[in-house]
Image (spheres, helix red, strand yellow):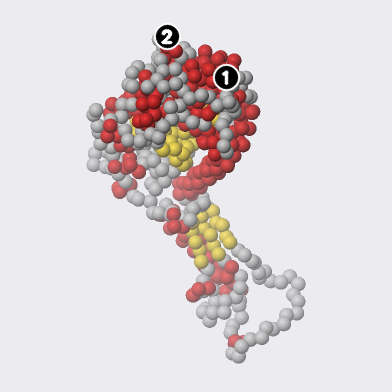
Amino acid sequence: MVSRSIPAPATVLFEPGFRFDGYELLVKIGQGGMASVWLARTRNSRDEEVLVAIKTVLPELAVVDELRTMMLDEARVATAIESPNVARVLKVGEVWDIPYLVLEYVAGESVDQLCDAVAKQGGVVPPAIAVRVLVETCKGLAAAHDLRSPSGELLEIVHRDLSPQNVLLDERGHAKLIDFGIAKARERITPETAEGVMKGKIPYMAPEHAMGGDVDRRSDLWSLGAVAYRMLTGTEPYDASNDAARLIRKLSKEPLPPWPASVPSPLAEVVTKVLSHSPDDRYPDAPTLAAALEAAVPPATFEEVAAFVREALGETIHMRHVLVERAVSAANARARARDMLSNPDMAPYVEAKIPSIVPLADPSPSPRIAPSLPPGAGDAAPASPLRVYGGAAVVALAVVVAYALGARTGGPVQVEADVATLAAPSASTSAPGTATGPAATAVTATTADTKPADTKPAPTEDASPTRPTADTDAGAKPRPPEGPLLRPTATPQGRPDGSTAAPEETIF
């Protein structure tokens, strides 16, 4: 295989706040042996903000030209799959020679998470719930398996990696298949880079697939049967202590162990058939399997599936909501900071912490009792309005200086002024209107929603590594795609100026 070198910034390119091609990365939500998955936001054709998932190939795998080309080709084919039970591939492209896929974001949890949660409670997924999920997954498989080219030729799309991790259950109880379009490329990874990529996949791999033979739609059906077995029994078919032992058991044509009493016999017969060693002994296609499942056990409603998932994974769902809310809030804070820096005429946002305010003049004076003072203290000059107004001037000057420095360094934009000492007369003998020593008013400038320690000066353009583009003048260093530590542009939500992203296909 032919490899190429990736620019050094690629290893640190993807982080919250990085923007390219109209997308802004919010938070990493997954990491596998081949790619990372990010929650991101963009704007649709109606100028509405929407969340998407972006899968980025790991830089160390992106250097293999053959692998990159195959993955991009397969993903482009997957963009044509249209089914409510398949998470759509919305866009395929490259940034800094690293392939990425923009996917429909599914707000939900995986069948793998559901099985684990139920197992911790000592149970299994009820047959009716399992059948509903399996039937919905069959519909997604059928949409992919039956996809044809514009000329009418069957494309023979096979998922190749159907597992509990790749079946998601949204909050309405619907099942969605993910990860179409990259499994074939995954199998071409060289031994040097394959460590960890196939981990956990052997139990759900059809026998002919595990032996390196030809695969077709019936191979995906075997994988779905293995998912059904996990949901109904709590274990994987041909389970063993390691993948090698599992593979030996699977290829030995060993029969499945007896089914537990909780699984109705008609349903057990359907799953046993689809797990046959020979593809010819299985169901021929996904619609036929779905019909057999529904005939064996009436499926639960979508509302029943959603309620079951909420009961089993309530804490996980709550944590996901919190993660998304925090990521969006942080992105909004970054957008406000960019607005401040791109518009010098905009007044700074000042949050003043004032625990108490003492009126400068009492509208209804009342008799006062002179406090007891130590000897000599009565000679001190009383506080005057000039001193109070002078202290206010110091605070105002500090706010202006903090804002000016923030605009120059790209750092502070929110100013918090603790002016508790402003209201009280100073006991200092300094000249009126000056603040000295510990009693001086403190002004702390922080970026919104972040701690002061997180503020870092933005590097200059000359220090930012990048790869040249076609419109770069000779001898000049071009501007790279904008990240959170680079100088923002005047467009808060649009495509960063000088984007180095390669052309890609978009399907919305």
Q: Please state, as top left, top right, bottom left or bottom right, where the N terminus lies in the image.
A: top left
**Quadrant in the rendering for residue 369:** bottom right
Residue at (60% x, 63% y) in the render: 354
Q: Is residue 109 at least partly visible in the picture?
A: no
Q: Earlier in the sequence, mark 1 or mark 2?
A: 2
Residue 241: x %, y % from top left = 40, 35
**Quadrant in the rendering for residue 63:** top left
Q: Residues within 10 Å of mark 2 (few under 14, many from 20)?
A: few
Q: Is residue 61 or residue 249 the one in the foreground?
A: 249
Q: Is residue 367 at least partly visible in the picture?
A: yes
Q: Is residue 373 or residue 174 the one in the foreground?
A: 174
Residue 411: x %, y % from top left = 43, 54
Above or below, 104 against 374 in this view is above
Residue 466: x %, y % from top left = 30, 41
Q: Is residue 48 or residue 305 the one in the foreground?
A: 305
Name the mark on residue 265.
Answer: 1
Secondary structure of the residue carrying numbered label 1: helix
**Quadrant in the rendering for residue 385:** bottom right
Residue at (42% x, 9% y) in the render: 152
Residue that sits furthest to the bottom in the current view: 375
Residue highlighted by disc 2: 152
Residue that sits furthest to the top in the current view: 152
Residue at (39% x, 26% y) in the render: 249
